[in-house]
Amino acid sequence: MTRGLGAPALALTLAVMVGGAGTTRAHDPITTKLTFAREIRAILAARCVSCHAPGGSAPMPLTTYEEVRPWARAIKDQILTRGMPKWHAARGFGAFSNDPTLTPFEQSVLVSWLDGGLPEGTPARTVAARPVAGLPSTQTSSAIRVTVPIRGEIARMAAGGPHWITGWTFAPGDPLITAAVISLDGVPAATWVAGDRPATLPAGIGFRSAGRIRIDVRRRAPTDYEQLFVPRRSVLTLLTETAGPLRRAWTEQVACGELRTGVPAELLAVRPLLDRRDARLWVARAGAPPAIVGWFRAFDPLYPRTYWLLRPADFNVDARLLSDGPCRVELTLVAPATARR
């Protein structure tokens, strides 16, 4: 058995937990019509309990009114500072399809409820259910499941091949696991970070793999602030398309400012390879205005997230990914619809 401070997709920081988790007094006046049962439960279910649930990767569950109330002050601090969920891209700089952060409206609702006396509403003891989401499948898709040992990394040949991989999800068996980097045929291709929902590539696009899969698991250091748990094996699930060929996606690691030497492509995603540093990124093309990609702040290597662009960006051979400082980035690219790689 081990102890640990669960990996926080929506975990509160230790400093805030120790210093700011005061319990709201029973006689606090009620000054809002918002209630836990009607409005707050739904927000928690959508944004928080993928990690903040019994057995989840966060150090405390937030599924019931009784669980949420003692953490009111800490929750407000994290909301106002955008400390959680773990997301290094600044709002307003680029748009990403896998953004898990609270919307301004959700922020205002939560803060108004927290400041308004935390009314429970009815029914009592409402539970914010942990979301159960699987990979979407079609008549031409199938799933490959790879079991990951409790400790270390794994390199395993998947049955058959080649495969067109179009989606993935990861079920950690240990709350200490913060992330997993998935490599196909020796090349990093996908990531999972604690709290992530299942990921799927845009329709008609896939990673082509001969079947060699490697999972590099990231873990945080254990602490003494969590209950005992028994680690289990983790499971990686890959969604594969059997009706290919598809437009092929691939990854390249480049230094910011370098010109590409490959084929014309569209940019699907970026993974900053930073170490607790900041970087503003944009795409520069001859004769075109700069296209903002994102502003990544205090990037934590324990959470090596891939940021999927809401809309693919043109990234021809004359394009460069520029930054306001030295950096390296992993790009996820796909050949234009008129070409195949």
Image: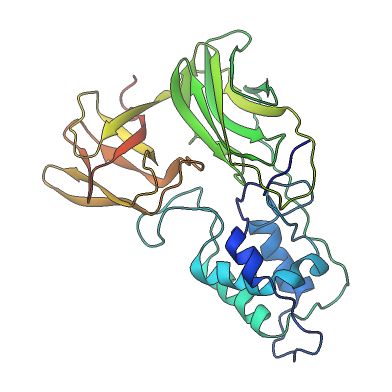
Give the image location of residue 99, x and y in percent: 50, 52
Quarter-of-image position of residue 187: top left
Q: Quadrant of the C terminus?
A: top left
**Which quarter of the image is occupied by the N terminus?**
top right
Q: Which residue lies at the image location 60% right of the left edge and 73% below the top edge?
A: 76
Image point (47%, 23%), residue name: 207
Camera-nearest residue between 124 and 8: 8
Nearest the eye: 326 or 21: 21
Q: Position of residue 61 (x, y in %)?
A: 75, 57
The answer to whether 116 appears left or right of 337 in the picture is: right
- Can residue 1 be seen? yes
Q: Is residue 266 above or below residue 68?
A: above
Residue lying farthest left?
287
In the rendered structure, the answer to whether residue 122 lies left or right of residue 266 reads right
Q: Residue at x 78, y 55 (%)?
A: 129
Q: Is residue 69 above or below residue 296?
A: below
Residue 281, given in percent of the width and then of the height, sits at 28, 48
**Residue at 74% from the left image edge and 61% from the top image edge:** 62
Image check: 122 left or right of 166?
right
Which percent across, then down, holds residue 33?
A: 72, 85
Choose between 120 and 133: the one closer to the eye. Answer: 120
